[in-house]
Amino acid sequence: MSEVALLGNPNTGKTSLFNMLTRSYETVGNWSGVTVEKKVGVLRGGGGRIVDLPGLYSLLPLTEDEGVAARFLMEESPASLLNIVDASQLERNLYLTIQLLECGRPMLIGLNMVDVARSRNITVDAALLQQELGVPVVSIVARKGTGCADVLQALGGLAQSEKSNFRIDYGPVIESSVTRMSERLSQAAAASSAHIRWTALQLLEGNEAVRSSLSGSDVLGDLDDLIAETSQQLGLTGEESDVPAYLRKIRTERITRICAVALDRSAQRIHTATERIDAILTHRIIGIPLFLALMFLIFKLTFDWLGSLLSDQLDGLISGTLSGWISSALDGLGASAFTHALVVDGIVGGVGGVLVFLPQICILFLLISFIEDSGYMARITLLMDRTMEAVGLSGKAFIPFIIGFGCNVPAIMAARTMEQRKDRLLTTLLVPLMSCSARLPVYALFAGVFFASDQALVVMGLYLMGMVLALALAKLFSRTLMKSEPSLFVVELPPYRMPQLLSLLRMTWEKVKGFLRKAGTIILAGSVVIWFLSNTGPSGFGVNMNDSFLASIGGALSGILVPLGFGTWQAGAALITGFMAKEVVVSTMNIIYQVPDMAGLEQQVAMAFTPLQAFSFIAFILLYIPCLATVGVIRKETSSWRWTFFSMGYSLVLAYMVAIIIYQGGRLIGLA
Amino acid sequence: MLLKHGSDHHQLALGHMKPGDTVKLHALHRASPLLRRRLRDLGVTEGSVLKVLRLGPFGGPLTFECVGQHIGIRRNEANRMEVAPL
């Protein structure tokens, strides 16, 4: 089946188009770097596969996510290319377009955001652009789906259409060098004939991905000599002697000529709405307080105003109605007492106990999606950069931090969009301190019992604690462990847009689905295992829980937990099982305390902990270890077991220190 | 503040402009290489016309507008970009 690669500058709507062309619901957002890895889909109408790639400005990648796209083009040889071009930023977008055209593959251009361009009085003539570039150009509005049918149709006819005759004459020095390099390449059969000119040009430009694809071949030495020679000759002509800069200059001149024909910006207007919103939201004095107020509003909505109300309703439904039905159904089927206990106490108790918090998680994800889609995300990095700079990080690290409030796994992957390795590594190590939605059920349970009147405040305090510790450790780690390179910060501020309700609901649903999947797999399996361990002991099945295997496993830990205020086997067992997924802490407690519903569990927890012990416990849960899935992604992104173990080790030490300070400090000031 | 340049004409630093100032970017060579590349990707090069939009508090980032796009960079980098008044 033929494969189409979707390429374009960051934040030009590639994923929106991908979703429209494939009926997928991949996450879209309004900042540069939403998509950090390739995503494959099947075109509607069975026209083959399409691959959505991270955005890039040119084929010379600067960041990891751009590298994914540049390498894909080299290694996978897609049959055709779909290049998305932002009509309101035509000049800048065409640079990549030219590099792709030189690649010599069948190509279609999707001229996106023509509505945004029109609203700013920017007119792009698609027909003239098509004439200039020699490949079909289709006007689209990907977010609304306008023109997507045309794109599908044009893609279908693409393979048959003749190849573009687009070619730039780079002048005698470069052209003769390209000819000689091409000869050398075709002798060695090192590149397929269609791409030889492109390969030579990319080598001259210094494309590492292309270079490394030739490594091992004996032509590389000769080619390097030719490149050095070209640079010398170019210097002799009195031109720019830096070959990449010279190539860029020639291409830019061509783009200027193309735009003179196809683009009319004479009556261009600025984004007045965006300007007005930014005057408030990024205001030098009220900008940061507004951001903090917004965060507090999110917690209020999630925990106080909406979340806990809905959660109580759901609890009644699951532990009352549903549990009752399952119970009587099992009785009706004549199930044994063993099966009955396994299903009702183990599975319904363990999984249901976590599902109860679905409303909070939905609301949090919905609000995060709103921030992602509105364009505010890029502004947050701008507001926070001064603080981040002080601790040796880029303001852009705040994007992974905020995504981390939803789930740490995509957050760590989002660190790819930062330009410097040090920034990426530090962010990867620190994201686990961002309190993800999996930790939310634990807070909701404990805060509901002990701090009912100011739930939102206590929970926001925990989130802030994670954030402050992350900043403090960033300072520490960047001083001690990293090479002292200054971090880089440069951010594009896209125009604001009103998120569409449908798209928000889809994005939320995609994230909630992940939570439900986890409930059906890890949490379910964990609950069954915990139930077994809590009912079996050295003397067999059906022992008193205090003599069970779970009690001895948890008890082994309880000794070192005593100074933290929760030296019980129950707490120890919950912490060990929580490594699988933090929600399992709540499942474990549900099973251990064998309670039919939330109210019962809350009573049990209230007896087992004092408020101070409870606070020490939830602070420990916040910090103590990245969950299993997060450990996996840290290993993948750092490609280093050392850093992976480091991230687990430092968080354990940190959690222990923080919990001991909270508990012992609290006792000292008489909060026992 | 005025920066001494090789020749006898004086250059201004972008970082010392005020919101609302419109300037022409004169030289980028003192900015860090990574930033230079990223700005070039965004179409900001020698000769580009920039309008300063906002300055962050406590020496925070400078936001400017260039060919219709809004871009934020650090003040110390902006201090190393030479501009000329229009």
Image (cartoon, coloured by chain):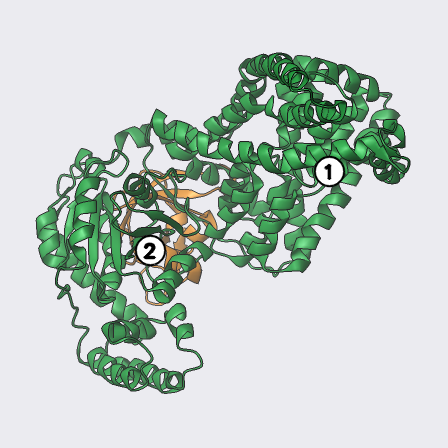
Look at 78% across and 20% down and name the residue there.
Answer: A605
Residue B16: image x %, image y %?
A: 40, 47
Q: Is residue A492 left or right of residue A84?
A: right
Q: Secondary structure at mark 1?
A: helix
On the image, the x and y values in percent for residue A618 come to 72, 29
Chain letter of mark 2 equals A
- Left or right of A185 in this view: A283: right
Chain B representation colour: orange
Compared to residue A661, the image places residue A205 above or below, namely below
Vertical side of A429 occupied by A300: above or below: above
Q: Nearer the viewer, residue A545 or A13?
A: A545
Q: Is residue A266 above or below residue A373?
A: below
Mark 2 is surrounded, within 10 Å at the Cα level, by few (under 14), some (14 to 19) or many (20 or more) other residues, namely: many
> In the figure, residue A1 lies in which quadrant?
bottom left
- The amino acid type found where label 2 is placed reads Tyr
Mark 2 touches mark 1? (CB < 8 Å): no
The label nearer to you, 2 versus 1, is: 1
Q: Is residue A275 visible?
A: yes
Judging depth in this view, the residue of A80 and B38 nearest the camera is A80
Task: Please state which amino acid type lies under the numbered disc 1.
Answer: Thr
Q: What x and y, as percent, mark residue A367?
A: 47, 27
Q: Quadrant of residue A245?
A: bottom left
Indicate which disc residue A57 carries: 2
Identify the residue at image location x=63%, y=18%: A326
Q: Which mark is residue A577?
A: 1
Mark 1 chain = A
Q: Colour of chain A?
A: green
Q: Within 10 Å of the Cα at label 1, are there few (<14), some (14-19), or many (20+) other Cα atoms?
A: many
Q: Which residue lies at the image location 17% right of the left edge and 76% below the top edge?
A: A171
